[in-house]
Amino acid sequence: MAVMAEPRRILLAGVSGGIGTAISQQLAGRFPEAQLLSISRSAEPPAGLPVAEHLRADLTEPDSVPAAREFLADRGAPPDWVICCCGILHGGGGGRGPEKALNQCEDRWLLESMRINVITHLHLAQALAPLLQRHCPLVWASLSAKVGSIGDNHLGGWYSYRMSKAALNMLVRNLSIEWGRRLERCCVVAIHPGTTDTGLSKPFQKNIAADKLYSAATSARRIVDVLANLDEARSGRLLFWDGEVLPW
């Protein structure tokens, strides 16, 4: 049985990104009665998005934890669904990007990858944790990446991105264990959305087959489908966009 097939309150972090924006639109269409809360570094969510209330916060910063906690506490019951879309692959505008070899690795870029791909999710979890109620079901989803799977890595390269996503996957695993003990019903997962046509993947689309490059709307629909059908047996797993369990 699904943990929470019809959420009443949803928290979406990273709403300003391509997938985050598409997920918000998908959620509004699927669950028109649900209250959608959002967090991003922007003062306002993208124009036209169906967001009930928005918090401007940089989740890489420690002070975002009490700010996000207060934002959620002021709105009553904790969210049923939490979706964290925060992530980075390249610096954009000719900035840093995936390393092909060890000698291209730089401390600064690795630490930046960890800050955005891992710390944002950690801080959001820390904000939420004191508000969780034992009898209230919870679905948590962190957008991760298949390249963060150690077992699936047969190509190498992309050091910072792979390392940071592997660390995110471990965070998700730990959360699933801790919150699984605290809550009567919960499912905490990492989800690989597939290669999606957004700014994050744009520099790397040249060699992607047309049928393997998905629109943001398609990826959002698939992600919401997976969340709506999650059961506790898949808690603590890395999932493909179709719900298949991927190796750690």
Image: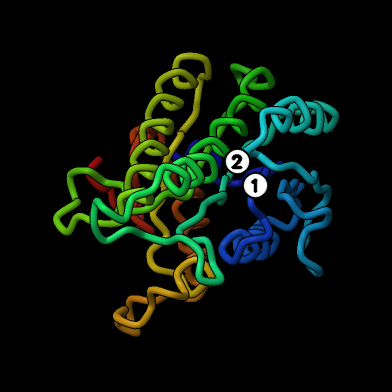
On the image, which quarter does residue 66 sit in?
A: top right
Residue nearer the viewer, 108 or 55: 108
x, y percent for residue 149: 26, 46
Residue 64 falls left or right of residue 104: right
x, y percent for residue 111: 47, 40
| Residue at image coords 42%, 38% | 168
Instruction: Say what amino acid the circle numbered 2 marks.
Output: Val
Say if 28 sits above or below 238 in the image: below
Density class for disc 2 (Cα within 10 Å; few <14, some 14-19, many ≥20) is many
**Residue to which mark 2 is pinned:** 82
How are the residues colored?
rainbow
Residue 199 appearing in the image: yes
Residue 8 appearing in the image: no
Residue 63 falls left or right of residue 4: right
Which of the labelled discs sits on residue 13, or is there none? 1
Instruction: Say what amino acid the circle numbered 1 marks.
Output: Ala
Residues marked 2 and 1 touching at CB (< 8 Å): yes
Gap between marks 2 and 1 measured at Cα: 8 Å
| Residue at image coords 51%, 14% | 182
| Residue at image coords 37%, 30% | 173
